[in-house]
Image (tube, rainbow, N blue to C red):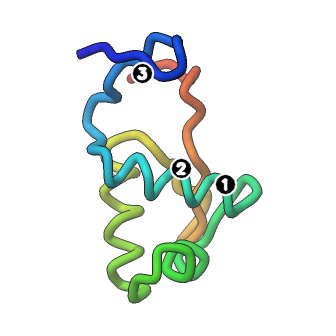
């Protein structure tokens, strides 16, 4: 499905619902580069175990990459798919 935002053609991002897109966008706005489970928990106002599950799901979907245990970085949209 395609849609327009302020005259720009947008496409629905596959595999990531509206709420998840909004959450990920908020994390990317509020952090610089990498982010930890505790930062995500604070930003999204979630318990740490729930934030870790969100990050794990996004990692499985290819939206974030794990740098090391508890530290993640968003995958650039230009990144080639696997």
What residue do we see at 36% from left, 61% from top? 56
According to the picture, the residue beneath numbered tag 1 turns out to be 29
According to the picture, the residue beneath numbered tag 3 turns out to be 81
What residue do we see at 52% from left, 75% from top? 37
Kindly state the secondary structure of the residue where label 2 is placed: helix
Residue contact at pointers 1 and 2, CB within 8 angstroms: yes
Kindly state the secondary structure of the residue where label 3 is placed: loop
Q: Is 74 positioned to the left or the right of 60 in the image?
A: right
Disc 3 to disc 2, how far (Cα)? 20 Å
Disc 1 to disc 3, how far (Cα)? 24 Å
Of the two numbered discs 3 and 2 on the same chain, state the one appearing first in sequence. Answer: 2
What residue do we see at 47% from left, 22% from top? 5
Disc 1 to disc 2, how far (Cα)? 6 Å
* Label placed on residue 3: none
Which numbered mark, 1 or 3, is in the foreground of this view? 1
- In the displayed structure, 82 sits above or below 66; it is above
What residue do we see at 42% from left, 21% from top? 81
Q: Is 34 positioned to the left or the right of 26 in the image?
A: right
Give how far across and how far down residue 61 sits, in percent. Answer: 32, 43
For the residue pair 67 and 47, the one nearer the viewer reads as: 47
Of the two numbered discs 1 and 3 on the same chain, state the one appearing first in sequence. Answer: 1
For the residue pair 52 and 29, the one nearer the viewer reads as: 29
Kindly state the secondary structure of the residue where label 1 is placed: helix
* Label placed on residue 25: 2
Give how far across and how far down residue 18 sits, in percent. Answer: 31, 45
């Amino acid at each position: 499905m395609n849609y327009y935002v302020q005259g720009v053609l947008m496409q629905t991002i596959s595999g990531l619902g509206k709420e998840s897109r909004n959450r990920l966008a908020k994390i990317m706005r509020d952090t610089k580069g990498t982010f930890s489970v505790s930062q995500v928990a604070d930003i999204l106002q979630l318990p740490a175990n729930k934030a870790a599950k969100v990050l794990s799901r996004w990692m499985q979907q290819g939206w974030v990459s794990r740098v090391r245990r508890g530290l993640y970085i968003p995958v650039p949209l230009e990144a080639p798919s696997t």
